[in-house]
């Protein structure tokens, strides 16, 4: 029997919690780390948000996996960060189930599609950002 996948999730936001639930349901051992000690009730409209592009060339490092914003940060123009994190987790859970616990095979099947998704969102966000900032 294979040892369960161990997942560390940085951030207890909706995306992080969703990822944790999906991966735990697929049999992963999940830990969620949140730096804030209180409910973030002071966030939302009116805050300044930096616009960054973050993309990684790979998401799988042995049995360590980057999901959500740890792998790709789509620009806020896409409104896709939470759904991308959920997609990362949901598809990883399906791959683990499909490969009956063969983690290496599951990760090999999962990573290429999620890298493509991240790159697509990055390009889309840049296009939307350029259009809104520079009119083209």
Image: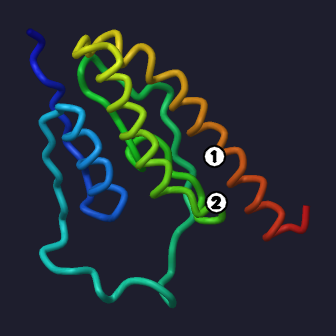
**Residue 78, position as x, y percentages in the image:** 64, 60
* Quadrant of the image occupied by residue 133: bottom right
Residue 88 is marked as none
Q: Identify whether 48 is placed above or below 32.
A: below
**Residue 53, position as x, y percentages in the image:** 57, 51
Whether tag 2 and tag 1 are in contact, CB under 8 A, the answer is yes
Q: Identify whether 91 is placed above or below 60.
A: below
Q: Identify whether 116 is placed above or below 136.
A: above
Residue at 49% x, 54% y: name it: 83
Identify the image quadrant of the N terminus.
top left
Q: In the figure, is residue 60 to the left or right of 78?
A: left
Q: Which one is in front, 118 or 94?
A: 94
Residue at 34% x, 10% y: name it: 105
Identify the image quadrant of the C terminus.
bottom right
Residue 78 is marked as 2
Q: Earlier in the sequence, mark 2 or mark 1?
A: 2
**Residue 122, position as x, y percentages in the image:** 63, 46
Q: In the figure, is residue 102 to the left or right of 133?
A: left
Q: Which one is in front, 10 or 30?
A: 30
Mark 2 and mark 1: Cα distance apart in space? 7 Å
Label 1 crowd bin: few (<14), some (14–19), many (20+), radius 10 Å = many
Judging by the rendered image, the residue that carries numbered circle 1 is 121
Q: Dot 2 lies on which element?
A: helix
Label 2 crowd bin: few (<14), some (14–19), many (20+), radius 10 Å = some
Colour convention: rainbow
Residue at 24% x, 21% y: name it: 63
Q: In the figure, is residue 103 to the left or right of 130?
A: left
**Residue 84, position as x, y percentages in the image:** 49, 48
Q: Dot 1 lies on which element?
A: helix
Residue at 32% x, 32% y: name it: 93
In this rendering, the count of numbered labels is: 2
């Amino acid at each position: 029997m294979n040892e369960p996948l161990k997942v560390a999730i940085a951030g207890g936001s909706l995306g992080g919690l969703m990822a944790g639930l999906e991966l735990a349901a697929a049999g992963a051992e999940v830990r969620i780390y949140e730096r804030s000690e209180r409910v973030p009730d002071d966030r939302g409209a009116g805050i300044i948000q930096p616009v960054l592009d973050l993309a990684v060339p790979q998401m799988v490092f042995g049995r360590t996996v980057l999901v959500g914003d740890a792998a790709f940060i789509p620009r806020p123009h896409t409104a896709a960060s939470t759904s991308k994190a959920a997609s990362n987790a949901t598809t990883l859970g399906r791959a683990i189930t499909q490969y009956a616990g063969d983690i290496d095979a599951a990760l090999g099947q999962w990573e290429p599609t999620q890298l493509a998704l991240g790159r697509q969102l990055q390009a889309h966000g840049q296009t939307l950002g350029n259009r809104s900032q520079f009119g083209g």
